[in-house]
Image (spheres, helix red, strand yellow):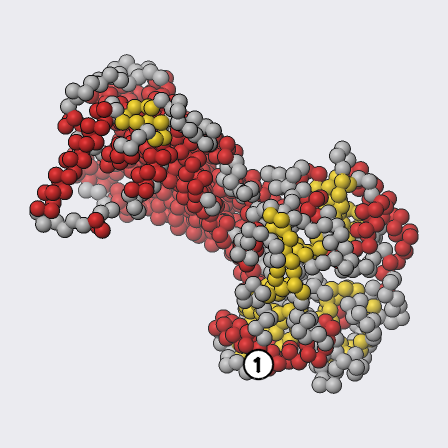
Amino acid sequence: MKSGGGGGGSRTERTYRRLLLLLPAELRSEFGDEMVALFRARLNEAGGPGRRLWVWIGGVLDVTWQAVVEAWAGHRTRQMEGTGLMGGTLKDVRFGLRMLAHYPVFSALSALTLATGIGAVTLLFTLVNGVLLKGLPYPDAGRLVMLSELSEKGSAMVVSYPNLVDWRERSRSFEGLTAGYYLSRPTIRGVGDPFEARAMGVAKGFFRTIGVQPWLGRAFTDQENDRGGPPVVVVSHAFWQTYLGAAARLDDVTFQMGSGTMVVVGVMPADFQFLTDADIWFPLEQSPIDIRAAGNHWVLGRLAPGVTAAQARQEMNSIAANLKREYGNDELAVGVEIRPLRNVVVGDAGRPLGVLLGAAALVLLLACSNVAGMLLARGKLRETEFGMRVALGAGRGRLVAQLVAEGSVLAMFAAGGGLLLSLAGLHFVKLSGAGMVPRLGEVSIDGSVLLFAVACAVLTVLIATLPPSLSVSHGVERAIRGGARAGRAKSLFWRMLVGLEVALALMLVVGAGLLVRSLSAIYNADTGYDSHGVVTVEFVIPGDQYPDAPTRLGFIERARAELAALPGVQSTGVGGVLPMNPTRKRGPVRIPPNLDIRDPAAWAAVAGWRVVDNGYFEALGIPLTRGRLFGPGDVDGAPNVTIVNASLAATLWPDQDPLGRTLRANWDFRDEDFTVVGVVGEARRWDRQPGRQPELYVPYQQRPEHADWMYIVLRARGDPGALINPVRQAFKQLDPRIYADVGTLDADIVESTADRRFTTAVLGGLAGVSLILAFAGIFGVVSQTVASREREIGVRLALGGTPSQVVRLLGTQALVWVGLGDLAGILGAVAGTRLLDNMLFGIGHYDMLSFTIALGVVLLAALLASLVPAIRMARLDPVTTLRAE
Amino acid sequence: MTRTADIDVGSLLPLHALEFRILLALVQGRLHGYRIVKQIEAQVSGGRRIFPANLYRRIRNLVGKGLIEEAPAGDVDEAAGERRRYFQLTPTGRRVVEAEARRLHELLGDAVEAGVPVSRSNWA
C-alpha cells in the first residue's frame, strides 16, 4: 500500500543523529548507526503523527538522560583513575556537563529559560516555514497560478463558465486550465446520521493540472465530467476512513449527496487539500452555469514549461479583449489577473505570522539576557574558584574555553528542551488552530527547523557567555585578593539589563493588549442588530423530498412553529442569509428608467438579496424606521413588495422618500418590479462601516424558489446555549433526513474572528512568558546588586538608618532603570505596533488604555521584583551583617 | 576482549534489570537491537518502552563486561536489505544469566517462605 505520509525518513534520521551528538563519541561511533536504525523502527511502528510525536519526545528524553548518566559516570571514573582534565574541546564539554550537574537548580533554571525562548522561536519559525516559506505540496507547484476576471474598474472577479471554456480553447500558455466552485455544503445521507459535508465541484483536468492523482481508485474522466455524465465523486482520505469504513475496494461504494446517489471512484491521499478543506470533489461540468456574466468559479492553471506568468497574462489579456468585443455587454471581463497559487493560498497570513515571529524573537532576546545575567552573577560567585585555577597555572584562554563549553552544553540542553516545547506547542496549535491558519495540516517540525533551533542555541551561548567570560578574565586578580566588589561598569551592565527586560516585556504586553482590545471591540461592535441571545438553525431543504414551493414553504413554516413552541424561545424568524454574510447572494439592483439586465450601466447599487419573514427583524432586533412590515397577503402571485435597509435607501434615493418606489434585483430570476413598502435599520457584519452593507428584503413566501438554504433565528429568553440541544432534537423529529446546523449567533461571530483569535492567543502567550522572564530577571539582578552591597547596608542600618530608608534607597536605584526601560519600551511599542495595523479593530494603534494597562502591569511586576529583595535586605540584622565581614 | 571463563561470576551480580532482560532475550540465540527490544517488550507486559540510547549504552556495558559479543552476521537473513549488528551471549554471559536467575529464584523462595503472596497475576 502506498502511503501519503511517513516520508522524510532521511531528514528524521539526520535530526536524530544530531541529537546523538550529546552522547560520548565512543558510544556514538560504536553504536550510532544502530541507534538510528532502532529509532527509525520505533517511528515506523508508531503510525499516526500523534504517536510519532510521543516517540520523538521519548527519544529526546532518552538521549538527554543517557548523556547525563554517561557524563556522570565518566566523571567518577576519571576521579578514581586520577586522569587529568585539560585539553580538547570534548573534555571541556564533559567538564561543562559536570559543572552543570554541580549547580542543578541554576542549570535547570537557565536551561528552562533558554528553552522557553528557543521553543517560542522554533514554534513560530516552524509555522512561518511551513506556511510561508515552504513550497506548496503539489508537484512543480511553482507553475501553478490562479486566474480571475478583471472588471472595468480593475477589480478581480470570479470566472464564469463560458469564459473558462473560451480561455481553455484559445490560450497556449497553459499545460492545463481547470476550475472549481468554492465549497458547497450538501447534506450526506446513507452513511450514518445525516450530516453536512464540504463539497467542491471541479472542472475537467483538475487532478491532472494540480498533479495529484487519487491514492485509491481513480479520478473521474473528462467524459464523466461532461453534460449527462454519471454521478461520480472522489472523496478525501478522512471521509473515506470516517464514513466509508476505509473500504479497500471501491466497487459499489455509494452515498446520498443532496438528492442523488453518488458513486465513489477515488480516494485522495491523506494530506491532499486544495484552497479549502473539502470532503468530496464532484464533476461540475455535468451541469455548468452557462451565463457569461455570472462568475462563480476559481480558475487554476499550470503554466506550460518555459512560460512566465507575465507572458501568460499578456496572452490572456488579449483573449479577454477579444471576448469583450465579441460578446459586448454579456461579457464583464476586460482582462485577466494571474497570481501565483502560493500567494493566493497564503493570503494575508504573512503579516500576523511575521509579527508573531518577531515577538518570539523578543522573547528569545529576553531569555538570553536573563541567562546572561544569571551566568554573570554566578561568574562572580565563582571568581575565587577561577582565580585559584589561574594561579595554579590554567591559562585564561582555557578558562574562557571552559565557560563557553559550559554554555554550549547548556545551550544543547536548552535546544533539546526548546524542541520539546515547540513540539508540544505545535501539537496544541494544530488541535486548536484549525481554520485559523492556512496550510496548518502540512506543518511539521523538521530538520531545517531543528537546525534553526540549534543556531538559536549557539547564538544564545555567544550572547550569554561572552560577558561572563570577559568578566572572569578581568576579575581574576581581584578574585585572588578575595572579596570582589562589583565594578562600576558591571553594575551598569546589570542595570541596563533591567531596563532592556522591562522594555521588551512592555512591547509584547502592549501588543497583546491592543489585540485583546480589538477582539473585545469586535464582539461589542455596533452592528445595527442584537446578536446576543440568538440561536441560529441552518438547514438545506432537499429538493427530492420537497420538490415544489408548497411543500418547501410548508416545511419551513412547520419547523418555525415547532421551534417557537419550545420553552425558552421568545421569538422566531426565517431568513435566507444572516447579517454576518454580507457578500452572499449579493447582486446588482436596478431602478427605473434603465432596467436592462445586461447593461452594467443600469446598476444603481449592489445589494444583498434576502428572503425573510417579519419575525426575522424582530428576533434580530432590527428596527423598522418607515412604512410597514410584510402582511399576510404578501405571497407568491400578489404584488411584489420589498423592505430596503437604510443604507440601500440612501444609495438609491438620497434625500427622497423611498416608500412606493420600485426596483429590480438581478438575484430575482423572474426579473419583476418590487415596490418598497418599508425601511429598516442596517444590520452589518462587525467589520463593515455603517452605510456599507445595503440590503433588500423580500418575503420568502413571495419567492419560494429562493427558500431552499434557510436559517431559522430564535431569540432566547435566557441562556441561548441551553436551547441548542432541544432545538436539534425538535428539528430531528421534524425530518430526520435533514441536517440542521444549530449554534448561537455570538459563537458564529467568534468563529469568524478565528485568525485574529489565533494571533491574539499566541501574542498573549508570548507576552505572558515575557512578563515571567522579565520578573525573574529583574528579581535576580536586583537580588544580586543588593547582595553585593550587603556591607554598606549593614553600616547604614547600624548608623541609624531605618529599614524604610534602605528600601527607598535600593528601590529608587532599581526603579530609575525600570523607568528608563519603560520609556524605551513605549517607544519600541509605538514603532512596533504599526505592524499590527490591519489586525486592530475599533481602536487606534496608540490606544491609551492598552498602553496604560500594559505600563501598569509591567511596572507592578518590576516593582515587586525589585522591592522584594530590597525589603529582605532591609530586614537584616546589622550586627550579623557586619560580623560576617 | 579476552575475559576467561574463570571470572568471578558472583561479582557481577545483581544485574541491572534491563541488562538482565537483554541477556534473557539472547538466551535463545543471536538477535539485533530491534529484535531484542521487541522480545523484552513482549515479555514485560505494561513495561516502559526501551529507547535506543538506553539500550545501546547497556549493550556497550555488557560487551565491556564480556557477557555478550557481536555475532558474525554472515548467514543471517535481513529482509530490510540493511545489515544490522547481531549480538549473542558469551559463555561467561550464559553463566552470569544462569547465576542471576538462580539468585532471583532463591530470593523468590525466601519471599514465599516469608509469607509474601506470590502469584503469576501480580508479576509485572
Most foreground residue, A339 or A491? A339
Q: Is residue A334 left or right of residue B75?
A: right
Q: Amino acid at mark 1?
A: Glu
Q: Give whichever of B93, A856 is nearer the camera.
A: B93
Total numbered labels placed on residues in the image: 1
Residue positioned 83% across, 46% down in the render: A169
Give the residue number, with chain letter if any, for mark 1: A562
Q: Secondary structure at mark 1?
A: helix
Percent of width and height locating residue A292: 83, 57
Q: Give above or below for A214 relative to A594.
A: above
Say whether residue B62 is left or right of residue A223. left
Q: Image quadrant for the N terminus of chain A?
A: top right
Quadrant hosting residue A375: top left
Residue lying at the far bottom of the rendered structure: A633
Q: Which of the image's four quarters has the C terminus of chain A? A: top left
Place of residue A856 in the rendered image (x, y in percent of width and height, measured from the top left): 44, 52
Residue positioned 71% across, 55% down in the render: A283
Residue A700 in sight in this render: yes
